[in-house]
Amino acid sequence: MSDGHATLDGAWIRAAVERFEGPLVLYAARLTGDAERARDVVQEVFLRLCSQPQREVETHLAEWLYTVCRNYALDIRRKERRMIAMNETAEAARSSAPPPDEALERREAAHEALKMLDGLPDDQQEVIRLKFQHGRSYKEIAAITERSISHVGVLIHLGLKTLRARVAESGANAATGKTS
């Protein structure tokens, strides 16, 4: 029997960890720029979940987890802006390295797409990643990012339109032998 506080039966917490830990770590890593810090953020998210009454969050668990994760990651990023800038510079250098010779063409295409995605404004990157990498709905993304559903739609539309144009330009340049 629950009195409104977190239940002692942690089965629902374990189920949430199993389902959301990996995607939340990826999301937090994109926000913080650091995989280790992302794991710390997600650990804190689940600690906070343990103190929540199950009945108050279970109907919108994904939104709650992503929102808490986003807010905590952004707080950390604000507090450690200088360190993050160095990490992002190092990450950008790593992500721009060419794939190994034996890599499949599909991996190279994915690498190029992620590179193009990294070139979008942060707000467009975030909503596109939430939609396509994390499978969140527009409604969930709106709740997570504290934007209206229509604003989320506009950001996704603009981001995808820019990406399509860059892919077309890249294909045209490859066909003519030009490099960007």
Image (cartoon, helix red, strand yellow):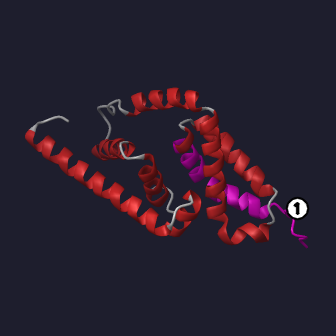
Magenta part, dominant SS? helix
Residue 31: % across, % down: 54, 44
Q: Quadrant of the N terminus?
A: bottom right
Disc 1 is placed on an element classified as: loop
* Image-based side of 14 in relation to 104, left or right: right
Q: Which residue is pictured at 62% across the width and 32% down the height?
A: 80
Residue behind mark 1: 8
Q: Is residue 88 left or right of residue 39?
A: left
The amino acid marked with disc number 1 is Leu
| Residue at horizontal 80 percent and vertical 56 percent from the top | 50
Question: Residue 115, position in %: x, y?
Answer: 35, 41
Magenta stretch encompasses residue 3: yes
Q: For mark 1, does the 10 Å Cα neighbourhood hold few (<14), some (14 to 19), or many (20 or more) residues?
A: few
The stretch in magenta equals 1-30
Q: Is 57 placed above or below 94 here?
A: below
Q: Nearer the viewer, residue 141 or 19?
A: 141
Considering only vertical position in the picture, is 92 above or below 31? above
Location of residue 161 in the rendering, given as x and y in whole percent from the top left corner: 29, 57
Question: Which quadrant is home to the C terminus?
Answer: top left
Please say if 41 is above or below 9. Answer: above
Identified at 57% across, 60% down, the residue is 146
Task: Choose top left, top right, bottom left or bottom right for residue 76.
Answer: top right
